[in-house]
Amino acid sequence: MKRSGLLIGLFVLVLTACAPAEERAPAIPSDYDEADIATLQQAMEDGSLTAAGLVDYYLERIAAIDHAGPELRSIIEINPEARSIAEALDAERAEGNTRGPLHGIPVVLKANIDTGDEMATHAGSLAIADHHAPDDASIAQQLRAAGAVILAKANLSEWANFRSTRSSSGWSSIGGQTKNPYEPLRNPCGSSSGSGVAVAANLTVLAVGTETNGSIICPAGINGVVGIKPTLGLVSRDGIIPIAHSQDTAGPMARTVRDAALMLNAMSAPDDSDPFSEDRPESIPDFAADLATDALQGKRIGVLKNYYGAGENPDIEKVFRNAVETLKAQGAEIVDDIEIETEGMSGASYAVLLYEFKADLNAYLASSNAELETLAEIIEFNTANADTVMPIFGQEIMEMAEEKGPLTDQDYLDALEKSKRIARDGIDNALKEHDLDALVAPTNGPSWMTDHVNGDHFSISSSSLAAISGYASITVPAGHVSGLPAGLSFIGGPFTEKSLIEMAYAFEQASKARRAPGL
């Protein structure tokens, strides 16, 4: 091991590195809390708002309700350059130059995404707490080029929730426990916990999450926001601390479908180093163009019958059936009781993740400037510093992954083939047999009470088919159970993001289900 001891000071989060309060622009009115990109752009165009003022506003909210007050703990580190970046973008606007719809719009990145700045990239783990990447991940570069202001890094389930079988989603040894903004004693889901909470609580306009199996879709659904899980190959994985290359992807999280689509536009540049990009269509559409309220007219939508926890919560079933009735009222033809055989899929996928986590994390660490270079060294560090790094749960998953052999093992190859075949055939055959444009299912059950003794206890999830197949999905707010958000997931084939976004937008406009938390 290259170092010992703990960087305890990293628990003390940087609240601000901006100009003194008396030099800042006035805070924007509270009626901008739920403002979308179009509203903010109009305000910046007419001079009633600046990007610097918007940054100041979010920093004040972060200080008031994330690092104090209810202490949501969604933001793990503030970008000390955020205000200067915003000021430079304001200067560009004053000269008549704007880079597009994200110009001056704050974005929060999950803390497993590289930024070549003063912020660390550590996946929430004290084991690599002082890892500062030498350059931006590809998606961070793309967002900066589009004019976005990288405001902060978001807390997450440590190592993207691939450390322990008893983990609490949203907990990391650097950031502590992220809380659900609708009920702080409840869980925000994960692993993109901070990203979902920050958007839901109006601490940013946009956020980036990453998903291997549900890590965008679940926290988006549970926190009442929109989340897009793109097809593998649409968004670059360069510069992101991995779990498994056969399932990992980054994706946008926003309060509206249009805003998520605008962000996906900025994130969808090709990555020639990613073998999955070979399947990309030659032309990628403008995901935010021509969104219309009548997009559900004539669409055939299948209602997925067998998702995890199906039928177990009557309140969720009521929200879901109401959502299906909304789809029908908007002109969709509903095909009920679509059942997809998934026996053996999850077990095979889990074996794949264990193999790939070891291989992919070792490769990332070896190419980085992190002080620890292998999964074995991280396990050793965690064991040596267990009182601080593992106070509430262990590292059983890491230990299982470390025992795996290389990616040439036949057991790995068989599990990869099996998991992909079951998931892809399941979606492909259902769409083809019933001539469907999409499948729908409840995204999540109501948020559970955070439990550091027993860990997470999910009740409903429908993310696995899209995650394991590598296909597209999107979740949209659909309703509430006892004040807690519930989402509706649209699932499609590969590179069907445009169609899914159009349908999700029409549903969103008809249902108007998004409600801000009462903070």
Image (cartoon, grey):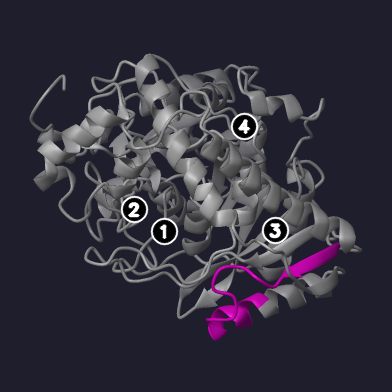
Q: Which residue is mark 4?
A: 235
Indicate which disc, 3 or 2, sits on the residue closer to the N terminus: 2
Q: Which of disc 4 and disc 1 is earlier in sequence?
A: 1
Q: Quadrant of the N terminus?
A: top left
Q: Which mark is residue 490?
A: 3
Mark linked to residue 414: none
Q: Is residue 45 left or right of residue 170?
A: right
| Residue at mark 3 to residue at mark 2: CA–CA distance | 25 Å
Magenta-colored span: 299-320
Q: Mark 3, residues whose alpha carbon is within 10 Å: few (<14), some, or many (≥20)?
A: many
Q: Any magenta on residue 314?
A: yes
In the rendered view, tell whether residue 192 sits above or below residue 515: above
| Inter-mark Cα distance, 4 to 2 | 24 Å
Amino acid type at image mark 1: Cys
Q: What amino acid type should be assigned to the residue bearing mark 2?
A: Gly
Q: Position of residue 392 (x, y in %)?
A: 19, 56
4 or 2: tag closer to the N-terminus:
2
Q: Which residue, given by chain and number where applicable, does mark 1 sit on?
A: 189
The reply to whether dot 2 and dot 1 touch (C-beta < 8 Å) is yes
Residue at (54% x, 69% y) in the render: 486
Task: Say what secondary structure mark 1 lies in.
Answer: loop
Identify residue for label 2: 170
| Other-residue count near label 2 (Cα within 10 Å), few / some / many at <14 / 14–19 / ≥20 | many
* Element type at mark 2: loop
Q: Quadrant of residue 290?
A: top right
